[in-house]
Image (tube, helix red, strand yellow):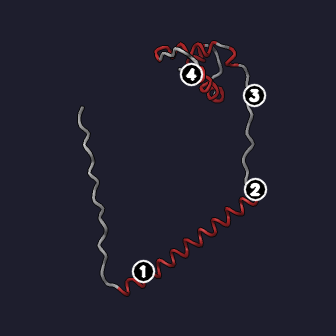
Amino acid sequence: MLTSSMDAQTRDTDEVSMKRHIKGVKEFINNVEDFDDKKIEEYMNEYCQEDDNFNEIEVVEKPKRTLSEEQKQKMKDGRKKAKEAREALKNDKKDNESVGTAESEEVAEPIVKPKKARAKKAAA
């Protein structure tokens, strides 16, 4: 709806403009005292007719975030510790399985969880 209103007023509808104006329209509508959802198209047209909403705004680009060498090293150390922990757990598990099968020949029954009863919605 905003795009059609902007096209009718020969306003730019490129992606950057649309992002900016979607926010502008939301603020514009929030400031309307007697808001009526049946008049939403009129509000869009009113927003697009006002030249103050379309003055050039300087877009400030944020610098790309970079990690410091210290942060990179901490991440590398963390990954290394996690890998070692996984390998130790894996080796521990293998050792326990071999001991467990030798001590006991019984096979454990799988645990079956009971199904939850679903509440039936009453027809209104």
Q: What residue type is labelled 3?
A: Glu
Q: How crowded is mark 4: few (under 14 residues within 10 Å), some or many (20 or more)?
A: few
Q: How far apart are marks 2 and 1 (CA)?
A: 44 Å
Q: What element carries label 2?
A: loop
| Front-most of residues 2 and 89 | 89
Q: How many numbered marks are there? A: 4
Q: How far apart are marks 1 and 4 (CA)?
A: 65 Å
Res 48 quadrant in image: top right
Residue 102, percent across and down? 38, 87
* Marks 3 & 2, CB-CB < 8 Å contact: no
Image side of residue 55 versus residue 5, left or right: right
Q: Which amino acid does label 4 sit on?
A: Asn
Q: Distance between the residues labelled 1 and 3?
A: 66 Å
Which label belongs to residue 97? 1
In the image, residue 71 sits, relative to residue 37, either above or below, namely: below
Identify residue for label 2.
68
Q: Which of marks 3 and 4 is in front?
A: 4
Q: What element carries label 3?
A: loop
Q: Residue at x 42, y 83 (%)?
A: 98
Q: Which residue is drawn at 68% across and 19% down?
A: 54
Identify residue for label 4.
30
Q: Which of marks 1 and 4 is nearer the N terminus?
A: 4
Q: Distance between the residues labelled 3 and 4?
A: 24 Å
Residue 23, percent across and down? 61, 27
Which label belongs to residue 58? 3
Q: Distance between the residues labelled 3 and 2?
A: 30 Å
Residue 101, percent across and down? 37, 83
In the image, residue 117 sits, relative to residue 22, either above or below, namely: below
Q: Which amino acid does label 1 sit on?
A: Glu
